[in-house]
Image (cartoon, rainbow, N blue to C red):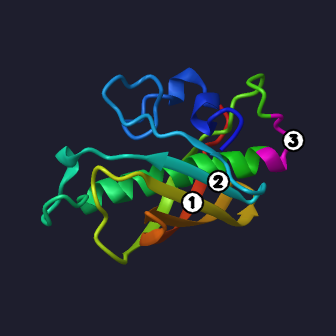
């Protein structure tokens, strides 16, 4: 992972998300970065045992959805911003996206106290709509997959 985190390029008024907002002192502060190429991104996080679900020492599904949601929206913003020439040097804020749809397939129980890797791959960009394929893995084992349709907020 290299460069500045996508979420650190959000304008202050859009940086309060519990999952990824830098201005939310109680949040997870998820950070997304470019992956191996310009069509992929990666985030890593190690969730505490306090987020255990019905299976002891395993993450509850709501947090899995939240992590995929935050990483997917940030990745959509990065993919779109890159397509219009954003330099990612801190001089230009990323355009903010919201979730239109998020479909998740829970494949295996996701452990807590283990570094998780979230990956996003660009499927398509169509004006204000960005489709992203998502995965969440623990120790290289895919625990959840998903697909997001992210919608770019309109400029004021």
Label of residue 119 in the image: 1
- Identify the residue at horizontal 63%, vertical 65% (top origin): 131
* Residue 83 counted in the magenta span: yes
Among the two numbered marks 2 and 1 on one chain, the one whose residue lies closer to the N terminus? 2
Residue 32 in the image: x percent, y percent?
58, 44
- Identify the residue at horizontal 18%, vertical 54% (top origin): 52
* Residue 126 counted in the magenta span: no
78 with respect to 108 (left or right): right
**What range of the chain is rendered magenta?**
82-87
**22 to 131, vertically: above or below:** above
The answer to whether mark 2 and mark 1 are in CB contact below 8 A is: yes
Among the two numbered marks 2 and 3 on one chain, the one whose residue lies closer to the N terminus? 2
Within 10 Å of the Cα at label 3, are there few (<14), some (14-19), or many (20+) other Cα atoms?
few
Residue 7 in the image: x percent, y percent?
57, 35
- Say which of marks 2 and 3 sits in front: 2
Residue 72 in the image: x percent, y percent?
54, 55
Closer-to-camera residue (128/54) = 54
Among the two numbered marks 1 and 3 on one chain, the one whose residue lies closer to the N terminus? 3
Closer-to-camera residue (62/50) = 50
**61 to 103, vertically: above or below:** above
- Secondary structure of the residue carrying tag 2 is strand
Query: Disc 2 marks which residue?
Result: 41
Residue 150 in the image: x percent, y percent?
57, 57
Within 10 Å of the Cα at label 2, are there few (<14), some (14-19), or many (20+) other Cα atoms?
many
Where does the N terminus fall, quadrant-wise? top right
- Identify the residue at horizontal 82%, vertical 37% (top origin): 86
Label of residue 14 in the image: none
Where does the C terminus fall, quadrant-wise? top right
Q: CA distance from mark 2 to mark 3?
A: 17 Å
Q: Residue 53: which quarter of the image? A: bottom left
Query: Disc 3 marks which residue?
Result: 85
- Identify the residue at horizontal 45%, vertical 72% (top origin): 142
């Amino acid at each position: 992972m290299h460069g500045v985190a996508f979420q650190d390029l959000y304008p202050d008024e859009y940086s309060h998300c519990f999952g990824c907002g830098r201005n939310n002192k109680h949040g997870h502060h998820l950070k997304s970065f470019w992956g191996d190429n310009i069509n992929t991104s990666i985030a890593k996080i190690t969730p505490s045992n306090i987020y255990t679900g019905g299976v002891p020492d395993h993450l509850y599904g709501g947090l899995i959805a939240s992590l995929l949601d935050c990483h997917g929206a940030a990745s959509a913003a990065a993919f779109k911003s890159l397509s219009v020439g954003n330099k990612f040097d801190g001089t230009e804020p990323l355009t903010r996206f919201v979730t239109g749809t998020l479909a998740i397939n829970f494949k295996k129980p996701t452990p807590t106290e283990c570094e998780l890797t979230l990956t996003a791959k660009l499927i398509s960009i169509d004006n204000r709509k960005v489709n992203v394929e998502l995965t969440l893995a623990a120790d290289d084992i895919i625990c959840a997959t998903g697909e997001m349709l992210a919608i770019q907020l309109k400029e004021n």
